[in-house]
Amino acid sequence: MSPLLIFLSFLAYTILVFLITWVTARKADNDSFFIGNKHSPWPVVAYGMIGASLSGVTFMSVPGVVEATGFKYFGLVIGFVLGYVVIATVLLPLYYRLNLTSIYTYLEKRFGFWSYKTGAFFFLLSRTVIASFRMFLVVNVLQFFVFNAWGVPFIVTVSIFILLILLYTFKGGIKTIIWTDALQTTFMLAAVVVALHLICKEMGLSFGGLVQQVSHSKYSTLLEVDWHARDFFLKQLLSGAFIAIAMTGLDQEMMQKNLSCRNLRDAQKNMFSFSIILVFVNLLFLFLGGALFLFATQKGITLPANTDDVFPVISINHLGPLAGLVFVIGLISAAYPSADGALTSLTTTVSIDFIGLDKKENLTELQKRRYRYLIHVSFALLLLGMIVVFNAINDRAVIDKLYTVVGYTYGPLLGLFSFGLFTKRRVRDKWVPWVALISPLMCYFLSEYSRQLFSGYTFGFELLIVNGAISFLGMWLLSYPAKEKMLPF
């Protein structure tokens, strides 16, 4: 594919996004930005959350990890479903009962000022890093295939993307994003389906024949039975459940979409349907990974050293212009939601949790909007800086980086919310930030020296569980029995 064709695809998709923005944001206000006026249709939210959950990370990295680990990632996916059930039956009822705009307001009601600010801060840290990783991944591919050929510096490419995302989320916020997420999901899935169709054609196989070849190959290994291994099945299952709870249920970006539904029942229908569909979508991506490596072996294709690049290289260079075109549009559609939801949720957290715009009755709607605009632009600049930094230090698979970061930064959130939900004790609120700081440091030590300390055991994604447990224990040590009657949280 020529760089010009790729650029025109990017331009066409961008125009489509701005058309959606124009339709959805014409009468938007602050309430539209934060919670979509509580009118978001749940089927659209559920469909869009598939793409938002997968993002460019799954789109690029999951097919690549099949080479080293086969289908073992699927254990994590099954764990996700367990986590989503907890979100739908425990967390969503809590958030709706308290009528929250920011989910971290719960921590103030339950513990106090410092716990509240600690939870909101750890979300800001987590989401900023993760959004930067996700956007870096997809923009880096477009830089390689398009903008390098035109001599455009990486920082200019990223700046263009950030500016476009800023413009289309500026007014509509979550009201716009639920529809652009649905668009993203459509193009990401289309890229996978087209690629599989063309692989079958090139290899002279029916789809059933391709399924048979992948299932009999080394790439289809599903379970790791060695408990020492990072991807031991039980560890994957438990880790997946807690990753889902942390990254979705305790994450303002993902919960903001759920809270924009008309009522709790709609939000729960969204979560249950989304979780079921997500299992099959992830399985499809894993199957694609196996198909890509079998295709490369049959055709004698030299694959890139970084497995994240396998899908783009084969789609663009070896499957013809149609596959390349659909892949690029899918990649572009993944680039936008990697940052748009983050920008909106980060703006919401600072606006509600740190500035308290919703409580400033002395400000007019216009003044509140101006504050929100300033925060929105500031986070756009921060994401730009983070992506440039990651471009300078990129040296390992992005999906591994993503969940490593999650293990350290979402752990304290997991501990805070768990302690609030499953105990009736009060805490010495001013010491909570220290617990949230010490817990990740202890986890880092355990991760570095686990082989020596635990007879060869290697921590994987279950480090998130350990982090949450240490935070929970720290909260318990700071706690005391509640004298007054606890509110029904």
Image (cartoon, helix red, strand yellow):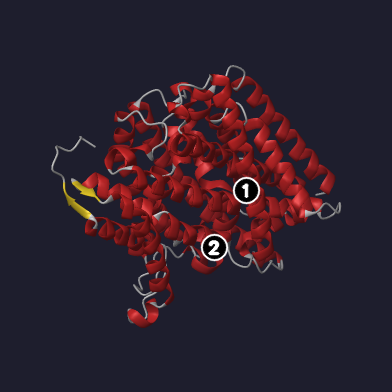
Residue 144 image point, x, y percent: 76, 56
Residue drawn at point x = 40 percent, y = 42 percent:
275
> Disc 2 residue type?
Val
Task: Judge whether 413 appears above or below 221 on screen.
Answer: above
Disc 1: CA contacts within 10 A as few (<14), some (14-19) or many (>=20): many
Which quarter of the picture shows residue 451?
bottom left
Residue with the most extreme top position: 27
Residue 165 in the figure: left or right of residue 12: left
Residue drawn at point x = 36 percent, y = 74 percent:
226
Task: Judge whether 261 appears above or below 197 on screen.
Answer: above
Q: Which residue is mark 1?
A: 383
Which label sits on residue 473? none
Q: Nearer the viewer, residue 106 or 362?
A: 362
The answer to whether residue 384 of the structure is visible from this angle is yes
The answer to whether residue 325 of the structure is visible from this angle is no
Q: Which residue is mark 2?
A: 65
Q: Nearer the viewer, residue 316 or 476?
A: 476
Q: Secondary structure at mark 2?
A: helix
Q: Secondary structure at mark 1?
A: helix
Which quarter of the picture shows residue 291?
bottom right
Closer to us: mark 2 or mark 1?
Answer: 1
Question: Could you tell which of marks 2 and 1 lies nearer the N-terminus?
Answer: 2
Marks 2 and 1, how far apart at CA: 26 Å
